[in-house]
Image (cartoon, rainbow, N blue to C red):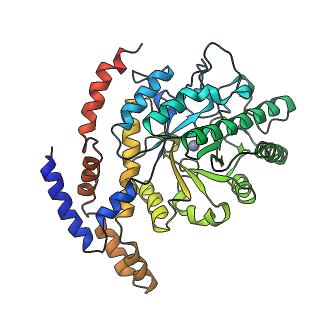
Amino acid sequence: MAAQNDIEKNYQQAKEIYGELGVDTDLVLEKMNQVSISIPCWQGDDVSGFEGSDELTGGIEVTGNYPGRASTPEQLRKDLGKALSLIPGSHRVNLHAMYSETGSDLVDRNELQPKHFDNWVQWAKEKKLGLDFNPTFFSHPKSDDGFTLSHRDDEIRNFWIEHAKVCRKIGEYMGKELSDTCVTNIWIPDGYKDRPVDRYSPRQRLRKALDEIMSVEIDKDYNRDAVESKLFGIGSESYVVGSHDFYTAYAASRDVLLCMDSGHYHPEEHISDKITAVIDFVGELLLHITRGVRWDSDHVVSLEEETRAILAEIVRNDLLKKVHIGLDFFDATINRVAAWVIGTRNTQKALLEALLEPTDKLKAYEKDGDYTSRLALLEELKTYPLGAVWDYYCLQNNVAVREKWLAEIKKYEKEELLTRK
Ligand code: RNT
Ligand code: ZN
């Protein structure tokens, strides 16, 4: 493993190499520290939550039974803390309503209050983290038939409307307490396995339900709302009420963010191309960066073509303030703490690569119609010393360089995870 001296030496060399292209690597590393990534708490416990439910519903699926799953709030926070200590920069944790802590009280989701998330908020304060939030519209008896906010039954639909309303208040509370705007994201599983005859009424009900939810006054400095679209789920293969067109139109016509999950599209359809298509109409975006393998499988984010393309789009178009970068994966076949570290560090590497790009130069080639130079430089850049800058960034932030973090995870696995029943 490279010694500190080597890392610094390699960085100096890389600095010169990028410098020749007019890229200031020191400045890039300052920018790196200003970008926080929203890390999904649900990777730590296979989307189980603390309500005692033992079944994950809603058409999403976690496979694997790697030992050490967090089953208490303390364990989940401890695991998150471990992961965060191996990720450079300061970040955010994304919570779901099912991660409430209600003590011995049985509190249904329509009655949740900010106090049920106080432990999370105190922990986030200590760790200097932001929090994001999601109402949970699955793994609950009232979502068993596959419909929530678009349910034809008023009572059930109203239950879920109430749930979303209290969640926006909780998001506002989190944002206020942490002086850091919380993004509260609505994703519902509603849809049909087989071809419906009436595709319209559920969408009309969903639109009205959302309007009612959003009519509750919220301080936008503390909470912003997002709606997440989807193509299909398990059990909703033929029709999803909250489809891409539905939510794009909804977000564009309301003061609400659009959430695009990179696993929610046709395999050849990419959200990297969608960012600039919608941003001027929706104002701000939330991303759920994930890796779909053949389907919406929520594999851990990899440093692959689409991840790099997404981050490049954000940086090239100066959209870091308008695009909230969140991750969404849950894999139970590998160490769950390592999964957070791998997925987040990969997203950061893609961000770093994007920030190190001499975009002005490339744009000038494009403007001049010199597509040869554009392609030549884009391809040469792929073997530029990104790794040397990344290593130095980790060193600067006092986190393990290269795969050194893995030894810490193995130790944590032995001392903590494997002792869990
Ligand atoms: C489901 C959505 C949603 C969930 C989380 C747990 O398809 O992607 O974002 O993954 O809310
Ligand atoms: Zn998602």
Count of residue discs: 0
**Residue at the spot x=68%, y=25% of the render?**
140
> Can you name the residue that lies furthest to the bottom here?
368
Q: Position of residue 318 (x, y in %)?
A: 49, 66
**Residue at the spot x=23%, y=65% of the render?**
15
Question: Within the displayed image, which quadrant is ligand 1 positioned in?
Answer: top right
Q: Is residue 404 left or right of residue 272?
A: left
User: Looking at the rendering, which quadrant does residue 338 occupy?
Assistant: top left
Q: Identify which residue, 265 or 358, lies in the foreground.
A: 358
Q: Please say if 368 is above or below 76.
A: below
- The N terminus sits in image quarter: top left
Q: Does the image show residue 130?
A: yes
Q: Identify which residue, 30 or 155, lies in the foreground.
A: 30
User: Looking at the rendering, which quadrant does residue 191 occupy?
Assistant: top right
- The C terminus sits in image quarter: top left
Q: Does the image show residue 57?
A: no
Q: Is residue 66 left or right of residue 385?
A: right
Q: Identify which residue, 206 or 296, lies in the foreground.
A: 206
Q: Is residue 260 left or right of residue 37?
A: right
Q: Please say if 266 is above or below 152.
A: below
**Residue at the spot x=63%, y=31% of the render?**
97
Q: Position of residue 235 (x, y in %)?
A: 67, 35
User: Looking at the rendering, which quadrant does residue 332 occupy?
Assistant: top left
Q: Is residue 139 left or right of residue 33?
A: right
**Residue at the spot x=50%, y=28% of the render?**
46
Q: Position of residue 201 (x, y in %)?
A: 85, 45
Q: Position of residue 238 (x, y in %)?
A: 70, 43
